[in-house]
Image (cartoon, grey):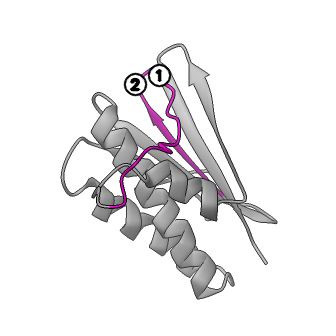
Amino acid sequence: METTGGPMTTRLPLPPSAQTGTLARRALRQLLETTAIDEDTRETAVLLANELVTNAVEHGRGTAYLDAAVQTRAIRLEVTDSSTVIPRPNTEVSDLAERGRGLLLIEALASRWGVQPRSDGKTVWCELDIA
């Protein structure tokens, strides 16, 4: 884990691996443990990061990056990958499906979210307001 911009920002490379989600959750928990943010908000941020990372590893190509920042009023999470496909929430997912709800979860739990296209891929981001 590389820490940049002070102790409240972190950047983590995400290799395409089955352990990537675990690494991302651990890194974000370490960052958030140093704050006064309540546990429910911290765990919601970890869940959101896990969904963003899972999508990047599953649909992107090569190494992706998780950038996490604790700002004055929000936790901002960004995952950058090399896929130029813009993700959209899957509103047609079956109740029995084991996958396909990640962006619906982000849409429901994040205060804001979006996608920033890039010439070499995209960044999917979300923010979670801090109470």
Res 116 seen here: yes
Residue 121, numbered label? 1
Which residue occupies 59% across, 83% down? 40
Q: Residues within 10 Å of mark 2 (few under 14, many from 20)?
A: some
Mark 1 vs mark 2: which is more N-terminal?
2
- Residue 55, position as x, y percentages in the image: 38, 44
Magenta stretch encompasses residue 8: no
Which residue occupies 47% across, 73% down? 29
Res 5 seen here: no
Which residue occupies 57% across, 76% down? 42
Q: Are marks 1 and 2 in contact (CB under 8 Å)?
A: yes
Numbered disc total: 2
**Residue holding disc 2:** 82
- Residue 47, position as x, y percentages in the image: 47, 67
Disc 2 marks a residue whose amino acid type is Ser
Magenta stretch encompasses residue 77: yes
Q: Residue reaching furthest top?
A: 119
Disc 1 marks a residue whose amino acid type is Gly
The magenta segment:
76-95
